[in-house]
Amino acid sequence: MKQKTIFVVDDVALNLQIAEDVLETKYRVITISSAIKMFGILKKVIPDLILLDIKMPEMSGFEAMEQLSSNPAYENIPVIFLTGLDDADNEAHGIELGAVDFISKPISEPVLLNRIKHHLEIDQLVKEKTADNLRLQNGIVYTLADLVENRDGNTGGHIARTTNYLKILVETMLQNGIYAEEMMNWDMDMLTSSARLHDIGKISISDTILNKPGRYTDEEYQIMKQHTLIGQEIIHKMMDRSGSFDFLAYAKNFAAYHHEWWNGNGYPYNLKGEEIPLMGRILALVDVYDALTMERPYKKAFPHEVALNIIREETGTHFDPKIVEAFFMVEQQFLQEKTRLSTDHKTEEG
């Protein structure tokens, strides 16, 4: 089993040495002399548990705990306060901030070892439960998405392709500071999983329309457009019945807004510019790229370069210009992914 990593953060060198002597035979111990230095190290190493002194210069343990709790990358790390402050108010404040326990100084070796062991075991159980829930969630999402796609015989492989395109595009935007502040708290696994439900509303569209071998009439198109509202309502009901989980909130955004246009000419709400939730604006580009480059009953597949020209021409009308900028940084990755997934889909059909 991989050795657990523990940060010990204290401005007193003797306290660091004592903690290291007690823990080093059982754990990988990293001693840190200030909370500010801890945040620098956290960018490279995520520990399994933090032992955090309260009274420190520059940044106190309480201040550090506030920063840890407010950052999604660190909020689930168990924190035990090391303190010489023996009063109920300080303990209550620390627990309120998110600490899992307090250990009083001077440190008792048996107490320290037992408390760490206890909280690491709890943390492991929580992680296992979370993993089980994630597997269940993904199983349900994949089944629903496959059900929709199997009914829609015109878009084979669409969900897998758009999901992968989405991941490429979001990662590129983050790396290049494009809407990065808004996206920094997004869970990438949850995001890509939930995007598979963006067309779930098609489950209520009749097979006659869904699988029509040709262009829609105006009346049929108006019915088809309802899949965004139907999808939003389906996911809203799921949220009402099971709780407002983040991945359902993501899925609701994708389902409702992926056909809105930057200039307000999209549907179902005719939203404009940044009125359109960012997830919808991103998926709008991804969805159109896939529709352009794949064969449909009413059109042949356009070559990649033709699709690029159309997307370029519709920048500022259909698409958010900043998202288009990110797309053109990785358009070759889109092409590679399209080729790979299209080949895989044909192999499965064969």
Image (tube, rainbow, N blue to C red):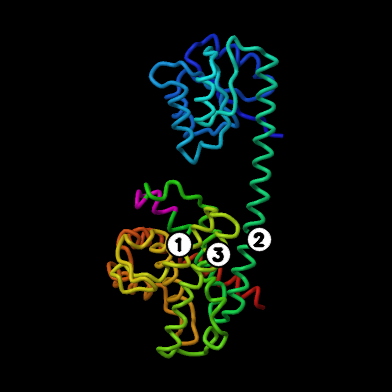
Label 3: state its secondary structure. Answer: helix
Residue at the spot x=45%, y=27% of the render?
64
Q: Which residue is mark 1?
A: 253
Label 1: state its secondary structure. Answer: helix
| Image location of residue 305, percent across then percent down | 38, 73
Label 2: state its secondary structure. Answer: helix
Residue at the spot x=53%, y=76% of the render?
202
| Image location of residue 291, percent across then percent down | 45, 75
The amino acid type of the residue labelled 2 equals Gly
Pick whichever of labels 1 and 2 is earlier in the sequence: 2
| Image location of residue 273, percent across then percent down | 30, 63
Circle 1/circle 3 CB separation < 8 Å? no
The amino acid type of the residue labelled 3 equals Lys
Q: Residues within 10 Å of mark 2 (few under 14, many from 20)?
A: few
Q: Quadrant of the N terminus?
A: top right
The amino acid type of the residue labelled 1 equals Asn
Q: Quadrant of the C terminus?
A: bottom right
Side of 154 relative to 325 (left or right):
right
Pick whichever of labels 1 and 3 is earlier in the sequence: 3
- Tell me the mark number nearer the camera, choosing from 3 and 2: 3
The residue range painted magenta reads 171-179
Residue at the spot x=63%, y=13% of the render?
21
The foreground one among 265 and 336 is 265
